[in-house]
Image (cartoon, grey):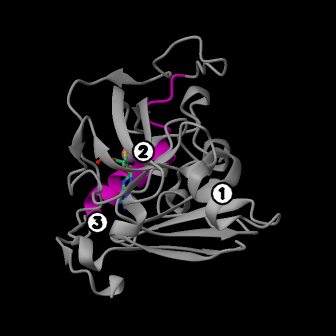
């Protein structure tokens, strides 16, 4: 059922190509990382007041009745949630800053949803599950280490600043992992896969850094820099 969600729009090939070129050109790198987070704003970022929308040109519209979240792979308790079941889980409220690799940062986002730690307690990753692969309804994927998915400030959010998360920002449900560049925070999440092996996602195979720490300016694949 969840595989039948119609995709509105088409993949913006030019945008993807431009962003791929940013990676090979090393755009926006200041060469002045701030690994100890002395400043609130990571290097090379600028603060914006309105929240930009970034996607691949495709916005899936997922009605709650058709929505499913599948959690599978190396977990003791693989689980599929329907919308009402998911929103009945213990709720979390968090406020955090987000940092996009295209250089905008947006402070003090108020989220409501389910803490990733709550989800981990329920599905119980096996010891070999060191990687988390996030799969979205628009076919986007991204990879994060389990330790970062499990960060205390990470959640699966359905609400932003007191309102239901809009479709363009990833509603019904998106991932929020504020300590990494925002491309790691998959919108329209449909599957969370726990894996013993790493699986680089959409941007990670197109020149973007596999980890993506904004304070270390890990915008792009380090190998590109050397060549
Ligand atoms: N499913 C999906 N998630 C995604 C993306 C996407 O294209 N599809 N773009 C990523 C990028 S590059 C960024 S910066 C943020 C943008 O989120 P926003 O549009 O809510 O600002 O979502 C990330 N998550
Ligand atoms: Mo981004």
| Ligand 1 contact, mark 1 (Cβ < 8 Å) | no
Taking depth in this image into account, of 202 and 70 the one nearest to the observer is 70
Tell me, yes or no, whether the highlighted magenta stretch contains residue 132. Answer: no
Q: Is residue 192 above or below residue 218?
A: below
- Residue 173 percent across, percent down from the top left: 35, 58
**Residue 121 tag number:** 1
Front disc: 1 or 3: 1
Taking depth in this image into account, of 99 and 224 the one nearest to the observer is 99
Q: Residue at x 24, y 37 (%)?
A: 162
Residue 94 in which image quadrant: top left
Q: Outermost residue, right direction?
A: 127
Q: Which residue is drawn at 44% across and 30% down?
A: 28
Tell me, yes or no, whether the highlighted magenta stretch contains residue 22. Answer: yes
Which circle's residue, 2 or 1, is located before the other in the chain?
2
Circle 1 sits in a helix, a strand or a loop, which is it? helix
Give the residue pinned by disc 3: 13
Taking depth in this image into account, of 24 and 175 the one nearest to the observer is 175
Q: Which residue is drawn at 17% across and 70% down?
A: 9
Q: Residue at x 34, y 82 (%)?
A: 2
Examine the residues drawn in magenta and state their main secondary structure: helix
Q: Is residue 207 left or right of residue 226?
A: left
Circle 3 sits in a helix, a strand or a loop, which is it? helix
Per the model, the C-alpha gap separating discs 2 and 1 is: 39 Å
Q: Is residue 152 left or right of residue 68?
A: right
Q: Is residue 145 left or right of residue 112?
A: right
Q: In this view, does 215 lie above or below 225?
A: above
Give the residue pinned by disc 2: 22
Quadrant in the picture for the N terminus: bottom left
Range of magenta residues: 14-30
- Residue 226 percent across, percent down from the top left: 67, 43
């Amino acid at each position: 059922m969840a595989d039948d969600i119609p995709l509105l729009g088409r993949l913006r090939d030019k945008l993807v190509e431009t962003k791929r070129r940013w990676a090979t050109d090393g755009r926006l790198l200041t060469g002045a990382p701030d690994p100890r987070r002395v400043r609130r704003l990571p290097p090379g970022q600028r603060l914006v007041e309105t929240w930009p929308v970034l996607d691949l040109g495709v916005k899936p519209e997922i009605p709650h009745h058709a929505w499913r979240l599948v959690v599978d792979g190396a977990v003791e308790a693989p689980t599929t949630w329907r919308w009402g079941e998911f929103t009945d889980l213990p709720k979390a409220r968090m406020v955090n800053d987000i940092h996009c690799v295209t250089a905008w940062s947006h402070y003090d986002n108020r989220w409501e949803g389910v803490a990733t730690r709550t989800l981990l307690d329920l599905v119980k990753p096996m010891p070999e599950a060191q990687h988390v692969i996030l799969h979205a309804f628009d076919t986007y994927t991204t990879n994060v280490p389990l330790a970062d998915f499990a960060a205390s400030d990470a959640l699966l959010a359905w609400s932003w600043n007191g309102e239901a998360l809009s479709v363009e920002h990833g509603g019904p449900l998106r991932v929020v992992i504020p300590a990494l560049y925002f491309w790691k925070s998959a919108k329209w999440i449909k599957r969370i896969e726990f894996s013993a092996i790493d699986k680089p996602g959409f941007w990670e195979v197109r020149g973007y850094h596999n980890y993506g720490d904004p304070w270390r300016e890990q915008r792009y694949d380090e190998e590109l820099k050397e060549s």
